[in-house]
Image (cartoon, grey):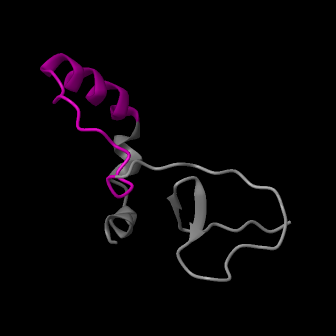
Amino acid sequence: MSYLTLEVEIDHGRVIPSEPGQLPASGKGLLTILPASGGNTSEPSAPLTLRESAEMRGKLAAWEEDWNAPGMEAYDRP
């Protein structure tokens, strides 16, 4: 089974593919509606408090050795 992801616009309830001919003639699918703001789904949040920062640091400490292991810098590059 192969899946297809399409970029579409919705205009008065009609789904319009960004490029013509992308939609199959038939089939089933799921439709996810993104915010009209261009797809940025992350809302700005308040900065972490000192306590929240300390808790997060404690939770991530278990991964510190792996994070700093030789060769892991490759994951920092885009």
Magenta part of the chain: 37-62
Image spot of residue 47 (x, y percent):
16, 30
Q: Is residue 8 above or below residue 57?
A: below
Quarter-of-image position of residue 63: top left
Q: Is residue 28 above or below residue 77?
A: above
Quarter-of-image position of residue 52: top left
Which residue is at a point 70% across and 50% down the rendered structure image?
A: 30
Image spot of residue 76 (x, y percent):
32, 64
Quarter-of-image position of residue 28: bottom right
- Whether residue 54 appears in magenta in the rendering, the answer is yes
Q: Is residue 30 above or below residue 62?
A: below
Would residue 41 be found to the left or right of residue 57 on screen?
A: right
- Quarter holding the C terminus is bottom left
Which residue is at a point 34% across and 52% down the rendered structure image?
A: 40
Which residue is at a point 27% across and 30% down the rendered structure image?
A: 57
The front one of 76 and 63 is: 76
Image spot of residue 71 (x, y percent):
39, 67
The front one of 76 and 31 is: 31
Would residue 8 be found to the left or right of residue 73 on screen?
A: right
- Quarter holding the N terminus is bottom right
- Whether residue 10 appears in magenta in the rendering, the answer is no
